[in-house]
Image (cartoon, rainbow, N blue to C red):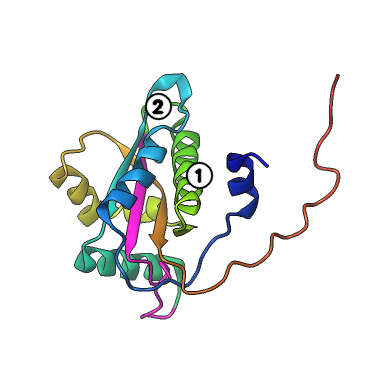
Amino acid sequence: MNEVLKAIKERRSVRKYKPDMLPDETIDQIIDAGLYAASGRGKQAPIIIAVTNEELRAKLSAANCKIGGWQEGFDPFFGAPVVLIVLADKSAHTYVYDGSLTIGNMMLAAHSLGIGSCWVHRAKEEFEMPEYKELLKELGFDGEYEGIGHCVLGYPDTTAGEAAERKENRVRYVR
């Protein structure tokens, strides 16, 4: 089977990670895959913030936990040591779709490199908070950005389950 199709069928979300940090080269390869995602009119609206700093990661986790309504101390990033935050420039009409494709590319790239990943929501709500809007400015991002999602990465500390059966009757051909 073609390697890309194989990766698409085998990739699963990982919700338990080892604390070991990924090598920078591996993170960079995964980010590069995200940067090559398709984007409407070639605008390349998404940006990626790679968080490996433990202090910032902990703050993001706590904010995400609060937004999600979980009990304090729950880690919605499942122990993953790397959080890739994807935001997109709201001036591009397809910014949400473009950011979604970015995360999808990164999850497939991670899988192809033997790295676990999971899409975690609530980046939109986080980056509506003043402290995270300020972070964007500190990082040199001007303009109006919306958080699309987090792609958490790490070495899996669990085995991937089997794919659920695909639902029937989801495709129609018009020839």
Q: SS of the residue at dot 1?
A: helix
Is residue 148 positioned above or below 126 on the image?
above
Residue positioned 51% across, 47% down in the render: 108
Residue 54: % across, % down: 23, 68
Residue 167: % across, % down: 80, 52
Q: Nearer the viewer, residue 103 or 20?
A: 20
Q: Please say whether residue 158 is visible from this viewpoint.
A: yes
- Frontmost of labels 2 and 1 is 1
Q: Nearer the viewer, residue 27 or 148?
A: 27
Q: Nearer the viewer, residue 33 or 175?
A: 33
Residue topped by disc 1: 104
Three-letter amino acid code at the position of disc 2: Ala
Highlighted range, magenta? 71-89
Residue positioned 46% across, 34% down in the render: 98
Q: Which residue reaches farthest left?
A: 138
On-image quarter of the N terminus: top right
In this figure, what is the number of numbered marks?
2
Residue 130 sits inside the magenta stretch: no
| CA separation in Å, label 2 and label 1 | 19 Å
Residue 156: % across, % down: 46, 68
Residue 85 sits inside the magenta stretch: yes
Q: Count neighbours of disc 2 (C-alpha within 10 A) and say few if under 14, some if 14 to 19, many if 20 or more.
A: some
Residue topped by disc 2: 92
Q: SS of the residue at dot 2?
A: loop
Residue positioned 34% across, 68% down in the render: 61
Q: Earlier in the sequence, mark 2 or mark 1?
A: 2
Three-letter amino acid code at the position of disc 1: Gly
On-image quarter of the C terminus: top right
Find residue 95 and name its label: none
Q: Count neighbours of disc 1 (C-alpha within 10 A) and say few if under 14, some if 14 to 19, many if 20 or more.
A: some
116 horizontally vs 47: left or right: right
